[in-house]
Image (cartoon, helix red, strand yellow):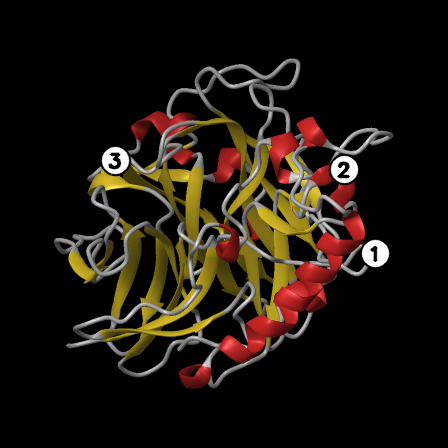
Amino acid sequence: MFRAGRSLGVFGTVAAIAAAAVTAVASPATAAPGCVGVSGVGSTGGPANAAPWLNGNTGGLPGLSGRTTAIEKVTGTYSPNKTVDRFNVLGTDLGIMWDNGAGQILTAFGDTTGLSRNPACDGLVGEWRSNVLFRSSDRVLADGMRIDSAPMDGAGQAREIIAGLKVPGVEASSIPTSGIAVNGVQYLSYMSVRNWGEAGQWSTNYSQIATSSDNGETWATHPETLRPNIGGVLPTGVGPVAGSENFQMSSMVKDGGFVYNYGTPAGRSGEVRLSRVPEDSILQLSAYEYWNGNGWIRADPAAAVPVMDGRIGEVSVQYNEFLGKFVAMYADAFSSIVMRTAPSPVGPWTAPETLVNLVEVPGIYAAYIHPWSSGSELYFLATTWADYNVMLMRTTLVR
C-alpha cells in the first residue's frame, strides 16, 4: 500500500536541506567552493538509485497475482520503520536474516545510502555504507516487520559493520551474504567485491567470515576463513585455492550438528555447491567437507559438485517445518523469484517454481527467507532496483 502520509515528512526534510544548501543536488563535480573530499554517492560509485522520488518511482508496493503478496516496505522513505529518520537509511538492498538465538532476527543489508550530511558538497544523497545491520523481535509478520535497533555511529545513523575500502578495482564494497548464530556467537559471511559489472555480474577478491559476541554491535574479521577468488586482489602471502571461487557467496543453515554452506560464485550466474562443517568449527577451513555427489570430501573445495543447477545468485536456504523439507529461494536468470525444495541438504532439489515473475515486478532480486515463518505462510525479503529498497513479502505454501 502506498503510504503518502509517511512521504510528506521526508519530502519536507529534503526541501529544507535543499534550501539550506542552495544546491542540494549538486554533484561533486559542481560542488560549492571549499569542499574538500566528499561522501556522496556520485563521488564513490555506490548505489545511484536510492532516492525513488528523484527518478520518478512512487515507492509503492507491487500488485501481484497468485500465491505471493507484497506486505510492506521494510526500508526507505515509505517504510513505517522510518529508516530515514531513525537510521539515515534512504536506500539499501538484500536483507539477509538469521535468528540470533536470543529472541531477535538480525538482518544484514548491502550498499546503503542516506541523506547527505553535507549536501552543498556531496549532493542530496550520500553517506554511503557498504553494509548495515538491523535487529527485530517482531513475530507477527502479517502486518509487516518492525525494526527495533541497529548498531549506530556517533552521528545518529546506522553504521557500517564490516569496513569496505570503496575503491573500484581494489575493493569496491564489502557485502554480507549469509549469517548464522552458534552458541551465542554471530557469524557473518561476506564478500569483498572488486568491481561491479553489468546487471547481475560482479567480481570478488575473496569471501570471509566475521564474528560478533555482542549481538552484532561490533565485528571481528577472520583472515583464516578467507576463500580467494580467481583474479582477486589478495592479502600478501595468500594464493589461489582450487574450488574456492565457487564459495564466494553463501547461505548457511544448521542441521544435525553441522552448518551447511550453500556456495555460489560471484554474481548471479553460477550453480550451487555444498559444504558442511561441525558447528564448533566454523572458523576452521580444514574442517569443512564438500559434497562430491556420492559423499563428503574433507578440505577440498574443488571436489564439490553442483547440487542446484541454473544461473543462481544470492540463494537463501532454510528448513521449513510445514513442508518438512529444505527450501531454497533466489532470483533466476530471468530476474524472477523462484523456490525449490529438497528432503535433505544434499537434495535432490525440485525444479524451480516461480513465485514472483519479472513482468509483475521488474528488477526484483535477493529473496531472503525469514527464519520465523510458520505454518503455510513463508515470509521473505526482496529488493527492487527501481527504488532500491527492501520489502517484506509472503507466499502461501502448498504441500
Say if mark 3 contacts mark 1, CB within 8 Å: no
Distance of label 3 from label 1 (alpha carbons): 50 Å
> Which residue is outermost to the left?
351
Image quadrant in which you'd find residue 19: bottom right
Say if mark 1 contacts mark 2, CB within 8 Å: no
Distance of label 1 from label 2 (alpha carbons): 18 Å
Task: Indicate the position of residue 89 as horizontal and vertical percent values.
Answer: 63, 58
Query: Badge 2 local density, few (<14 within 10 Å), some, or many (20+)?
Result: many
Q: Earlier in the sequence, mark 3 or mark 2?
A: 2
What is the three-letter code of the residue carrying label 1?
Ala
Q: Measured along the vertical axis of the image, is residue 263 above or below residue 236? A: below
What quarter of the picture does the C terminus occupy?
bottom left
Label 1 or label 2, whichever lies nearer to me, is 2
For image coordinates 57% across by 18% down, the residue present is 233
Residue 37 shows in this picture = yes
Q: Earlier in the sequence, mark 1 or mark 2?
A: 2
Lateral position of residue 294 relative to residue 209, left or right: left
Image quadrant in which you'd find residue 317: bottom left
Lateral position of residue 353 relative to residue 200, left or right: left
Residue at the spot of label 3? 292
For image coordinates 76% across by 47% down, the residue present is 22
Give SS at disc 3.
Answer: loop
Front-most of 127 and 373?
Answer: 127
Lateral position of residue 55 relative to residue 336, left or right: right
Q: Earlier in the sequence, mark 3 or mark 1?
A: 1
